[in-house]
């Protein structure tokens, strides 16, 4: 068997360049890189050497580079991924938040973080974190709790096992998540005689586990005996490519569908069985069928608190079924488990159920809700007054076509979009597993790289924009066009509502006007975005917003449209349940002791709500 002598870093890049998908594309599309002393000499040289077969992209911050990579993987339905490399100190720890985001959302990400010297000869090197009691610890150990696979490359031959293990995790639909390779900086530059066979192209296949016969029979029996079942569609439907299967299953068996944040757009909003968003930020129609269901069937969802109204939404006697590719998720809430790929499970259940049809769901509930959505999103008569977020969403909906993808991550907009955005299939991209402020701009860039055929609309509040915006400059440099709709309500409006309405508190430290500052800030977001090369404008009203959205399609760079919005309450936050039209309880603890009657009253209401929560785990 022949060998080829390469440095460990060269071997890594050569190997990554020939790891392929079923569609004959690189599984790892390339590597985002910010170089420092811990990765420039080894990894940097190797990336330069293989730049023609394995591309490198420079970002502005390690965390946001990784956010772009994660959004790419989500946009590619986990069929492709990207890698990120950092140096050994702040660069590595900057990646912890992004790794946690990928971990929570079950998304593939390869992190190649520079590490200290394996020989320990020059210890402590620049930026080295020393543990006084454990000589094996480095800053990269911070990544252990938020990685699905962690390895430390302290010998060149470790790559022979570490690289295949990392990709095996990233391509495993059940255990998918971030893989971290802490790469000792001296080892990156060490030479080794690698087997030539190691660099033969390899195709990574995504498995589709079929359901166990016993589990399938039990779940089919539960469905057959149910009169009013409901389906809760999660992100697993999309990652499985089961959108059409879900649509056919729901129609054939007359079962209404409610959506999670990750599952929204698995069914187009126009599909007659799509009753809208589930849970805390849910629609009146979806929450009514969920609360009245005798059987709740989760498909590819973790049944997170927003989906279940913190375990208060489903009737006490309702049976839960969870179809999930991972047994850990399938067993949550005491559900009857069906561990399988979503598409395989729905196909098998359809065959078992035959001509079974559930009791007639009330179509007027869905019609009434969509009529309410139109009212929330209608063009405001007063174009001089700041619009609500719902009116902004309506303007974007009117100004875009079937190919538009709305994306977001944190603040008020995720709840509003889940509630009000009416997507075509695949027209929604939300990072809400970790709800990470600062994901939006970088995520829009990564999503556009994954879906160049579709218009990407990034909704971001002023708070999230202030946290992380620098990848706008990267998108300008690389000519990656997307549109940012920056809603400015002068602070953290979502948390302010939670503070004042949800928890009975007083406005404090969220809106700029309620902060301990000497001067109220007047931030010129248009000038800021333009300084990074984006086309930036301010829209005075929703009519102007619609016009600017149309104009943005002709550009090959990002467009940032700033629009001032009102911070007043509007249906869609999940907290204004007095409207009686939507939303459900969310368990956010209210202080038990307070000198204000409003907060004491809120605590009494809170105790009544948590008493309704299902206790089965």
Image (cartoon, rainbow, N blue to C red):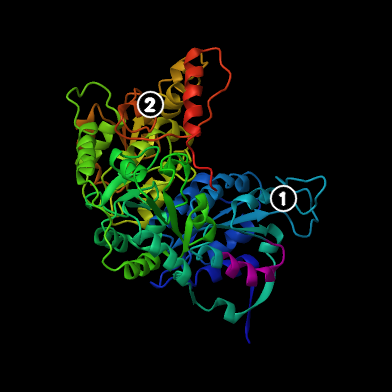
Judging depth in this view, the residue of 545 and 299 nearest the camera is 299
Q: Which residue is mark 2?
A: 524
Q: Position of residue 561 (x, y in %)?
A: 30, 35
Residue 35 is one of the magenta-drawn residues = no
Of badges 1 and 2, nearer the viewer stands: 1
Q: CA distance from mark 1 to mark 2?
A: 41 Å
Q: Is residue 582 above or below residue 70?
A: above
Q: Residue at x 66, y 48 (%)?
A: 142
Q: Is residue 366 left or right of residue 242?
A: left
Judging depth in this view, the residue of 418 and 282 nearest the camera is 282
Q: Position of residue 319 (x, y in %)?
A: 43, 52
Magenta stretch, main secondary structure class: helix
Q: Residue at x 52, y 63 (%)?
A: 170
**Which residue is the extreme one toward the left?**
381
Q: Is residue 100 above or below residue 588?
A: below
Q: Is residue 43 left or right of residue 566?
A: right
Q: Which contiguous range is marked in magenta? A: 152-166
Q: Which residue is mark 1?
A: 138
Local packing at callout 1 (Cα closer than 10 Å; few below 14, some 14-19, many 20+) is some
**Which residue is the extreme one toward the bottom?**
1
């Amino acid at each position: 068997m022949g060998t080829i002598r390469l440095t460990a870093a060269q071997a890594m890049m050569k190997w990554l360049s020939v790891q392929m998908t079923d569609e004959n594309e690189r599984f790892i599309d390339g590597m985002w890189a910010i170089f420092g002393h811990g990765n420039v000499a080894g990894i940097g040289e190797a990336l330069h050497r293989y730049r023609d077969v394995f591309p490198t992209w420079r970002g502005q911050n390690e965390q946001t580079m990784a956010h772009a990579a994660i959004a790419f993987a989500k946009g590619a339905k986990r069929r492709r991924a990207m890698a990120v490399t950092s140096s050994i100190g702040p660069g590595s720890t900057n990646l912890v938040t992004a790794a946690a985001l990928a971990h929570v959302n079950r998304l593939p990400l390869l992190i190649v973080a520079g590490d200290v010297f394996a020989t320990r000869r020059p210890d402590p090197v620049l930026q080295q974190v020393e543990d006084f009691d454990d000589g094996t610890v480095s800053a990269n150990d911070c990544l252990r709790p938020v990685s699905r696979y962690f390895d430390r490359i302290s010998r060149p031959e470790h790559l022979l096992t570490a690289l295949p293990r990392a990709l095996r995790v990233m391509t495993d639909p059940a255990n998918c998540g971030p893989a971290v390779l802490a790469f000792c900086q001296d080892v990156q530059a060490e030479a080794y005689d690698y087997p030539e066979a190691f660099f033969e192209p390899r195709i990574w296949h995504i498995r589709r586990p079929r359901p166990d016969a016993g589990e399938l029979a039990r779940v089919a029996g539960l469905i057959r005996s149910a009169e009013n079942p409901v389906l809760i569609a999660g992100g697993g439907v999309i990652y499985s490519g089961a959108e059409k299967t879900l649509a056919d299953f729901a129609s054939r068996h007359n079962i209404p569908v409610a959506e999670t944040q990750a599952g929204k757009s698995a069914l187009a909003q126009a599909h007659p069985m799509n009753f809208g968003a589930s849970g805390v930020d849910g629609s009146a129609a979806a929450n009514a069928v969920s609360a009245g269901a005798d059987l709740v069937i989760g498909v590819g969802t973790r049944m997170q608190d927003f989906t279940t109204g913190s375990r208060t939404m489903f009737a006490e006697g309702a049976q839960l079924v969870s179809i999930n590719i991972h047994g850990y998720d399938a067993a949550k809430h005491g559900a009857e488990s069906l561990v399988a790929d979503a598409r395989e499970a729905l196909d098998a259940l359809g065959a078992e159920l035959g001509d079974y049809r559930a009791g007639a769901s009330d179509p007027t509930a869905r019609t009434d809700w969509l009529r309410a959505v139109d009212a929330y999103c209608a063009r405001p008569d007063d174009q001089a007054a700041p619009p609500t977020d719902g009116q902004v969403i309506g303007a974007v909906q009117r100004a875009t076509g079937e190919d538009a993808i709305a994306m977001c991550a944190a603040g008020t907009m995720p709840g509003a979009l889940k509630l009000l955005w009416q997507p075509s299939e695949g027209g929604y991209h939300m990072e809400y597993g970790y709800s990470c402020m600062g994901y939006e701009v970088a995520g829009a860039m990564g999503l556009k790289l994954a879906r160049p055929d579709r218009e990407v609309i990034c909704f971001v509040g002023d708070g999230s924009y202030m946290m992380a915006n620098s990848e706008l400059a990267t998108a300008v440099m690389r000519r990656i066009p997307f549109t940012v709709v920056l809603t400015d309500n002068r602070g953290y409006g979502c948390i302010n509502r939670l503070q004042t309405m949800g928890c009975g508190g007083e406005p404090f430290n969220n809106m700029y006007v309620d902060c301990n500052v000497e001067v109220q800030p007047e931030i010129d977001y248009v000038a800021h975005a333009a300084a990074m090369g984006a086309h930036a404008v301010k829209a005075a009203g929703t009519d102007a917003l619609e016009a600017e959205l149309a104009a943005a399609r002709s550009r090959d760079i990002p467009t940032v449209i700033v629009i001032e919005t009102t911070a007043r309450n509007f249906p869609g936050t999940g907290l204004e349940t007095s409207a009686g039209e939507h939303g459900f309880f969310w368990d956010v603890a209210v202080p038990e002791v307070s000198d204000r009657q409003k907060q004491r009253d809120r605590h009494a209401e809170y105790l009544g709500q948590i008493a309704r929560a299902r206790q089965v785990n």
